[in-house]
Image: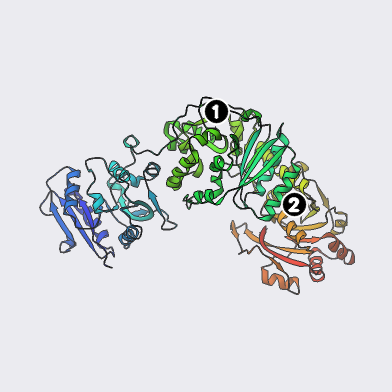
Amino acid sequence: MEKELISVLIPLMNDDDNDLLLLCLQTILEQDYPNLEIIISSKLEKINLGNFFNDSRIRVISIPENSLAIIRMELLRQAKGEFVTFLSPSGGITEYDALTTAYRLVRENDLDVVISNIVSLTNGVFYMKKVKSAILEEINPINYYFYLKRFREFCSLEGKLIRRKSAIILDYSQSEQKIIEQLIALKANIAWYYGNIFFWREEYGMFPNCNLTEVELYPPVLPKLDISKEKIPNEINILLCVDDNYCSKSYALLYSLNQTTLNKINVYLVYRELNTYNLTMMLKIAAQLDMLRIVPVKIDDYHYNQLKLFSLHKSKLPLSAYYRILATKLLPQVDRIIYLDIDMLVTADLTNLWQTPLGNNIIGACCDLPLTEQENSWSYQFLGSKGNKYFNSGMLVMNLAIMREVNFFEKITDFIQKAANAFVLGDQDALNYFLQDSVEIVDSKYNTILGYTNNITSEPVIVHYCGYDGLKPWELNPHVDSKMKVKYLNCHRTNTRDLLYKIANFPKVSIVIMGGLKEKRKLESLLFQAYPNFEIIILGDNAFSSEDFADIKYSSIESLAELVNAQGEYFFFLDGKDYLKKYDSLLNIMTVAINNHIDLLLTQSMKLVEKEGLFYIKKESKQLIPIEEPSLTAFNDKHGNDGGASSGILCSKKDFVKFLNENELGIEKILQGLYERVLNKYYLEEIVWVKVE
């Protein structure tokens, strides 16, 4: 099918811009799009077209006007194309196939307008935005305001491909920003494309920025309510939202709730899918935590499909981050609840928080202090003068009774479906904007962001492991030097281990450090392990004091022969500088070993070359593979030395000690002998430790 005509309209407002015009024309005429016309307006009868004076695609029309609005309307009247784009001599088109791309987007998606990145050209250098994929975002009256604040391209008519029938009905006497807003208000089919189609020469004038005083098309917010009487139930209700990735990370929070509450509380565990292991673990936890009544609540198909309509391809958040907005639907019998993020720990009873009156508001929340206490932060860019009330959505006291009355779920769902990808901080931005007139700000001790604890004066009641420094208890944090931060990181880890110790009879593991312990990250990788029953045995020098090990006991030995006195039923060996990669590394390999009655387990590693500062990561299948190679040497040849030295190897103590008593050999020879002797040996093709070179 023949491609439709595109009219490129260039108003030449200043005769001195003729040289720029020639540069602009060159970028247009180099396009591979086959059906173009270029209409240039000038006050003069003739202008210098240089080498392009014989090009039949170019028309020059004389318009003796100073009004850009009148000139644009006349250019539109003269245009014959199905689509038009306005350019100034200071602009141009980027790559040779840019117009072809723009045309393909409008035709394939039945668009009226496509808006793309405007690339800056400064001193001959293009500053192009990195584009991961050709993703289109719908622009509508609800998300327009957010895109306007983030992208300068919404402030100018420059470089838009517009269907002519939409362009001719616009009022060009207004500012360019208002012209774009007209298109949005008319509900034209508009999309934002992350590609680089047009450019602008910055040295000949700055590209316009948004003028918020001109905006009339604002997204909806929940109106201020008049709540006559607020009912606060006696029993505390807690809402947690989990999936298979986050289920195990909730253990510390559940245990801390059980340890701190003065009265029994109801914990509603909302999920869509949980595998058998996670469901079984939650049942075991529910049986052990006597102060909690854990109620699993599965999301039904209808409401899950509503959430799936959210466009989240730009977000790092999982869909489970939005489960909390389902509370009014999933818990019809509950009138008030405290939502908590999984990456939290409760350090004191929540009764005072539960009884906090919300007045005419439907939620209570804490200011996101890292933002609200910093001028020009995102909270002020996002909410303007209300930026000082921007809240962290990790803890929410929710008045579900009133939320039902105002049809909160339906309204917030419609809002997020139309605006999700316009946000910087995902669901938190959505809630902050929509509820900006309906939030009661409560004391920040109820949502103390760990990375910001040095700025908090009161003792935290709820610690939140979030923030830009990425302090997660299940990740390595060797750079942390704050005693308070280390305290709460270890507190979370201790809670996890204590709970796991209660719910299962985990055999003890002796972690044997070969060659001494000299690296802080190795120590950290042991401190944060979730496995609840292990000891540390160091063969070689130890550079750390007992205080560095917090609640973990360790012992030092001088020879392998002393391992006969180890308390563990299993040995796990780490060598030199090597360290465990994940917080659940030991838990995972022990679960695999126990469930499969394994005597010798070899595990996969990734390599860190310290001189290069680079990690080399192997492809992992996460499968448990029976070992068939006849020798450890043959195994290493096939699997990249994952059975080499002594790192990442798990074996039963009885087999190791038996072989040790029979032979006075080094660790490598002993492990080779075990490899050849034991029958039940496997390789776990999952990265659980880091080899340091």
The answer to whether 10 appears left or right of 618 in the picture is: left
Of callouts 2 and 1, which one flags the residue occurring earlier in the amino acid sequence? Answer: 1
Q: How far apart are marks 2 and 1 (CA)?
A: 53 Å
Vertical relation: 4 (above or below) 343: below
Seen from the viewer's position, the closer of residues 2 and 12 is 2
Residue 229 occupies which quadrant of the picture? top right
- Say which amino acid is labelled 2: Leu
Relative height, residue 655 to residue 264 (above, below) = below
**Mark identifier at residue 358:** 1
Q: Position of residue 580 (x, y in %)?
A: 69, 54
Residue at 52 percent of width and 50 percent of height = 302
User: Is the N terminus in the top left, top right, bottom left or bottom right quadrant?
Assistant: bottom left
Q: Position of residue 277 (x, y in %)?
A: 69, 54
The kind of residue on which mark 1 rests is Leu
Identify the mark at residue 566; answer none if there is no mark.
none
Image mark for residue 517: 2
Q: In which quarter of the image is residue 493?
A: top right
The furthest residue to the top: 228
Left or right of residue 36, residue 317 in this image: right
Q: Which residue lies furthest to the right in this view?
A: 661
Residue 309 position, x and y percent, is 47, 51
Q: Which residue is most to the bottom?
A: 630
Q: Do the residues labelled 2 and 1 touch (CB within 8 Å)?
A: no
Query: Considering only vertical position in the picture, is 445 above or below 96?
Result: above
Is residue 491 visible to us here? no
- Look at the image and tell me in which quarter the C terminus lies: bottom right
